[in-house]
Amino acid sequence: MATRASKYVTLGQWNLIIFVTLCLSLHPGFVLKRDEGGFSNYGIHIKTAIPYTLTYVGCVFFTLRASNVMPVIGRESRVLVALLRSYALICFLLLVSTYGYSVNTPLKDLHGVVGLIAMVFDPVASIWLYVRVRNFNWDRTWFGAELVGLVLGVLDFFKVVHVLFAAQAVIAIGFGFLLVHATHQIETAEAVAS
């Protein structure tokens, strides 16, 4: 049975899946090619800018909503609320830094720094999430996806292979599932404790 905060987190993650898929279907060539680009390519093209924007606006809205309805009783719920708010802030910064990154080098560098923060935040936060929910086989799968995505991100960062979108997608999928499951587990435990 879903709890209030986990319902909002789930809606935020479904929002991501739906609008990323829409962006991919509108123009797969931005990211699915030999010299693969990142998801931000969808934010600077007129054809995909609206669904790209809705990807992050929805995720930020639902994640903040989850952080606001999460019962804060113990340490784990306080950390989870901080994690949810940090995630929402990073998504917001990714969105707003996208629009100007093709204008000049400083804006491109700013977007790159925000992207790097996101690529590190999700796997690091996933360690904390995984420790709380590691009782199911699927949790190991999603945590493993995080690690694979992190390795792909490192390989892309050092220009060994150009697989930025693959790294972003794998990290986002692993993180999303762990976030939903951990939110449900922690919220349920807090409700029982109160």
Image (tube, rainbow, N blue to C red):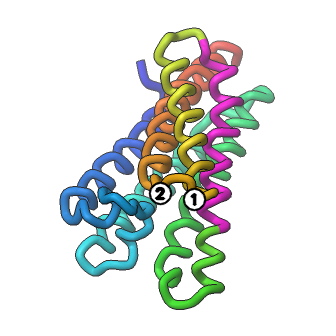
Q: Is residue 159 above or below residue 9?
A: below
Pick the residue in front: 60 or 160. 160
Type of amino acid under label 2: His
**Tag 1: Cα neighbours inside 10 Å, few (<14), some, or many (≥20)?**
few
Residue 89 appears anywhere in the view: no
Residue at screen point 35% across, 69% down: 42
Query: Which image quadrant is residue 49 in?
Result: bottom left
Q: Residue 123 carries which label?
A: none
Pick the residue in front: 158 or 148. 158
Pick the residue in front: 117 or 150. 150
Separation (CA) of disc 1 from disc 2: 6 Å
Type of amino acid under label 1: Lys
Q: Is 64 left or right of 30, judged from the image as shown?
A: right
- In the rendering, at what x and y percent does residue 186 appear? 63, 23
Query: Chief secondary structure of the magenta span?
Result: helix
Q: In this view, does 45 lie above or below 5?
A: below
> Which image quarter holds the C terminus?
top right
User: Pointer 2: what residue?
Assistant: 162
Q: Is 15 left or right of 88, judged from the image as shown?
A: left
- Residue found at the very far left of the displayed protein: 26
Pick the residue in front: 33 or 149. 33
Q: Are marks 1 and 2 in contact (CB under 8 Å)?
A: yes
> Which image quarter holds the N terminus?
top left
User: Pointer 1: what residue?
Assistant: 159
Query: Which image quadrant is residue 53 in?
Result: bottom left
Magenta range is: 113-134
Q: Is mark 1 on a helix, strand or loop?
A: loop
Q: Is 59 left or right of 140, judged from the image as shown?
A: left
- In the rendering, at what x and y percent does residue 169 appear? 43, 46
**Tag 2: Cα neighbours inside 10 Å, few (<14), some, or many (≥20)?**
many
Residue at screen point 39% across, 70% down: 41
Query: Which image quadrant is residue 24 in?
Result: bottom left
